[in-house]
Amino acid sequence: MAIITRNPSNPILTAKDIPFECMRCFNPAAFRFNNKYCLLIRVMDFQKNESFAFADSEDGINFKVKKDFQMLPSETDEGRMNDPRVTKIDDTYYIFYCSDPKSGIKIGIKKTKDFETFEDIYYSLPDNRNAVLFPEKINGYYVRLQRPFSRWYYLDRGYDIWISSSPDMEFWGRHKKVLSYTDVAWGNNKIGPGPQPIKTDKGWLVIYHGVEGPDGTDTAWKKTYRAGIMLLDLEDPSKVLACPDAPLLSPEEDYETDPTYRPNVIFPTGVIEKEDGGINLYYGAADNSIALAETTKDALLDFCLNPPKYVHPRSHSEHRPYLSFHA
């Protein structure tokens, strides 16, 4: 769609750009650090162990991955950590990520001020993942979006976006559902939060992912991942003000439909706001590389508040009715 454009340099990072053993890299967190555009990158080696790499850039397009940085899983993570999101509040960077031990998928939280030393401050109960922190306290509390789910897919419990808050980043409560997968025409399999929310005078812009399966199940890789967006209330972000029916970005380019590993995947995980109102959206493409799409805050707001008419060609309304929200 015209409101968001892919950068012509895509994919901006692939496995060959990682200076240590790497089979694929994808799903990066994005943030500013030392006046540079930075990415914390999910990296998988040939034994399918996962870790995080660090890359920085002067222009937000041409990134160099540091040779001397590799964040490895702790003993608690049991060799698997993925899908980081990074949010800065005051002088501290909070890294939310998915810890994937055999005991169940958890949200892990680390904090750092210098990306040299890190402190583990939280692990959730299983099963929970895809969490992201709002970039400021709301009514005195830290607030996060998350996607709790059941690993027992046959229970058909759904995969929705929830919100919770904490006074100290350790004790989380006031859990409330924000958006259900039944609300998303192209998300009959599951939905989940993406990058850190973007504050505007109209509300919080939240980019999320939605997953469409052939029949709503998660039993085979015949799924399509897209990016969507919604607008949440500034003071009470559990309230959805607008949620267009149309996705923001769908897999179309070769690097997004690449059949090497998992085709037809756009997985948004990082945003960086530019001083001119521009927005860089970084996303994993086909779970195999990293791509960049560019837009503006005003364009995203207009898309939410004046959504285009849209009817999904494979609407699952017969399977599970969905709702639409418009301001």
Image: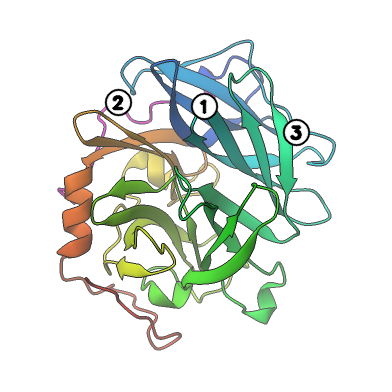
Mark 3: secondary structure: loop
Q: Tag 2's secondary structure?
A: loop
Quadrant of the rendered image containing residue 82 = top right
Dot 2, crowdedness within 10 Å: few (<14), some or many (≥20)? few
In the picture of the structure, the residue carrying the numbered disc 2 is: 9
Label 1 packing within 10 angstroms: few (<14), some (14-19), many (20+) = few
- Amino acid type of disc 2? Ser
From the viewer's perspective, tell me whether residue 304 is left or right of residue 256.
left
Instruction: Please give the range of residues in magenta.
Output: 1-16
For the point 28% across and 72% down, the residue is 312
Of label 3 and label 1, which has the lower sequence position?
Answer: 3
Q: Mark 1: which secondary structure? A: loop
Position of residue 220 relative to residue 248, above or below, is: below
Q: Which mark is residue 73?
A: 3
Question: Viewer-nearest of labels 2 and 1?
Answer: 1
Q: From the viewer's perspective, tell me whether residue 5 is left or right of residue 82.
A: left
Residue 69 x, y percent position in the rendering = 63, 16
Q: Is residue 14 magenta?
A: yes
Q: Nearer the viewer, residue 295 or 202?
A: 202
User: Disc 1 marks which amino acid?
Assistant: Asp
Are circles 2 and 1 on residues that touch, CB within 8 Å?
A: no
The circle on residue 265 is none
Spatial separation of the CA atoms under disc 3 and disc 2: 31 Å
Residue 138 x, y percent position in the rendering: 45, 53
Sequence order check: which comes first, mark 3 or mark 2? 2
Query: Does the stretch in magenta take in 226?
Result: no
Query: At x 32% / y 53%, what residue is drawn?
Result: 205
Q: Give the number of the mark in front: 3 or 2.
A: 3
The CA distance from mark 3 to mark 1 is 24 Å
Secondary structure character of the magenta stretch overall: loop
Q: Which residue is mark 1?
A: 91
